[in-house]
Amino acid sequence: MIQLQGIEKVYRTDRIETVALADVNIRIGEGEFISIMGPSGCGKSTLLNLMGLLDAPTRGSVQINGSPIATYRDREVAAIRNKEIGFVFQVFHLISDLSVLDNVQIPLLYRRMSNAQRRTLAEAALDRVGLSARIHHFPSQLSGGQQQRVAIARAIVGRPRILLADEPTGNLDSQMGDEVMGILKTLSHEDKTTIVMVTHDQQKADQTERIVRLFDGRQVN
Amino acid sequence: MLNHYLVLAVKVLLRRKFFTFISLFGIGFTLLVLTVVTAMFDHTFGPDATEPRQDRTLYVDRAVMYGPRSTWSSNAGFKLLDQYARNLPGVERLSIYEGNRTVHSYINGKKIASSLKRTDDEFWKILEFTFLEGGPYGTQEVAEARFVAVINATTRRRFFDGRPSVGQTLEADGQRFRVIGVVEDVSELRTPPYAEIWVPYTTSKTDAYKKEIMGDWSAMALAKDKAAMASIHEEFNSRLLRVELPDPKHYEAIVAPFETKLESFARFVPTSDRKDPESQVWKLVGLLAGLGLLFVLIPTVNLVNINISRIMERASEIGVRKAFGAPARTLVGQFLVENILLTIVGGVAGFVGSILALRVISQSGIATYARFTLNPRVFAYGMAMAVLFGLISGVYPAWRMSRLNPVDALKGGASR
């Protein structure tokens, strides 16, 4: 499903060069639920961004379903992100001026479908995460856990085959964190969604099928 | 999708009310000034009921006689027009008329100042006045120098308390005229129609005007069709080369071209060359365009700056949209919709302000009898300006936004 080969990511400014990732090779199969762990600054989020096609490697190749992304134009990469990949962020990144329902519909705005279809899919996604009663609320009216569930609904509304979650429970208490993990595991088991989760939490990582460990930008396992 | 953008646009505008107000005020005020100026320009030079054939009418107003060290600039003289402007090929009708002069009358011990114009009979055939009573003087009245007058509605009110006045006698400038017609008031900004009292030019107190090459006279030539206008202009210019100039020791040439109203007005622009018989209108257009551009540039640059800072505030939202596959073009379109909405709201505010401003200007008496209004054409120009304004001030910030790296945008807008 996702294949990274010989990945290197270097950030250059006028004065310094930072190697964020070096010689990373990862293969993730369809339906796998894996986590990426490592100390702060080891390159976890950078790796997730590369998997999510939000950034491009300095060297190496990223393949989604066997297709090398490097040959694609920006418009085509954006289309792949829209169709195949969903994102869940640590700080939720919900748009405060939009209702819960409107936030969840965002990925569908960039697909050809009617307003009624968008609404139906968004309501179904919110139902899956248990927030049907909150569709007209605004993010500021929700708890942290509820906001993260809205973010998950937004990530899955378009039925992507890949879900990338960057510290999804990082800003939540343990109970809310468990709720979110429950939703992710359900998506993995029932929808066979490929899930890659970055986490600091060993307990959460142990609930996944495989752990990829990074240290100073390199894989250690 | 448009609904989504419009809803979001409204919410974004309401998020920072003060800055939105500043933006709307800048846009509204700029458009108010431009719309008012356009309305006044349109009132002065645009189509009008009294000048329905303006698009095929040429005018001679200013004349310049010059030599190596001397220049004489004034209106044309009667002799210049009478002798050289008649029977030009392509002319359907020609009218010669004097510049307005202020004359005084005394009614019940009260002094009344009126604007009086002396014209020929062709004047009434080229222009179209709305007569409330009677009619104009004709060829015979002019030939026989009859002391008859057409007055406007305000003069009827001043002299005769608004009662029917055809047949009544009116004294102006020491002469007595019999009123034969009353017309609706004409705006002071509409030349040549404007005056308050019109009389045959043959009633002038002296005949000295008949010998003058330079004086206080003007002519308007109604062309048979628009195609004839260029040849009228050229033929008259070639006739002017044969004019017998007074004082040839000091003056060697005269320029007094037949031009459109706008071209004639353009000769007043400081940078125009009055000795050049060819059109100077491009200098006027250039000056107005330059001033207009400068005037619009300031709020545009201001709005561009505000938009860029607003984009940076919304970097997270942009990052999310890009992460979920929003194409750059769609994001640019979203932002332009928001910006155009803002400028349309500002445009509407400017439009409402323009109506009020034009009413105040009309009532101020800054130009006698002028009633400035917003007609559909001027409104369309105003809204087109608002949309253009929105596009121009939104394009660069939208382009900047589309270039934001999603990772950096999600971090808060810092670009690498």
Image (cartoon, rainbow, N blue to C red):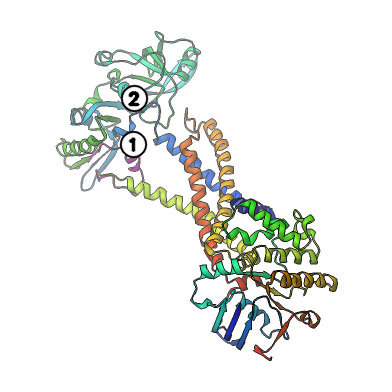
Q: Are marks 2 and 1 on the same chain?
A: yes
Q: Earlier in the sequence, mark 2 or mark 1?
A: 2
Q: Does residue B348 lie above or below A175 as drawn?
A: above
Q: Is B36 on the left-hand or right-hand side of B200?
A: right
Can the viewer see residue B218? yes
**On the image, numbered disc 2 is attached to which residue?**
B127
- Number of the label disc, if any, that sits on residue B261: 1
Where disc 1 sits, the SS reads helix
Q: Position of residue A128 (x, y in %)?
A: 75, 62
Q: Position of residue B162 (x, y in %)?
A: 49, 13
| Chain letter of the residue carrying label 1 | B
Q: What's the magenta region?
A: B255-277
Q: Is B7 on the left-hand or right-hand side of B284?
A: right
In magenta stretch: residue B269: yes
Residue B416 or A205: which is nearer the viewer?
Answer: A205
Q: Residue type at mark 1: give it.
A: Lys
* Circle 2 residues within 10 Å: few <14, some 14–19, many ≥20: some
Q: Quadrant of residue A2?
A: bottom right
Q: Residue type at mark 2: give it.
A: Leu
- Number of the label disc, if any, that sits on residue B211: none
Q: Write the residue at 33% across / 36% down.
A: B261
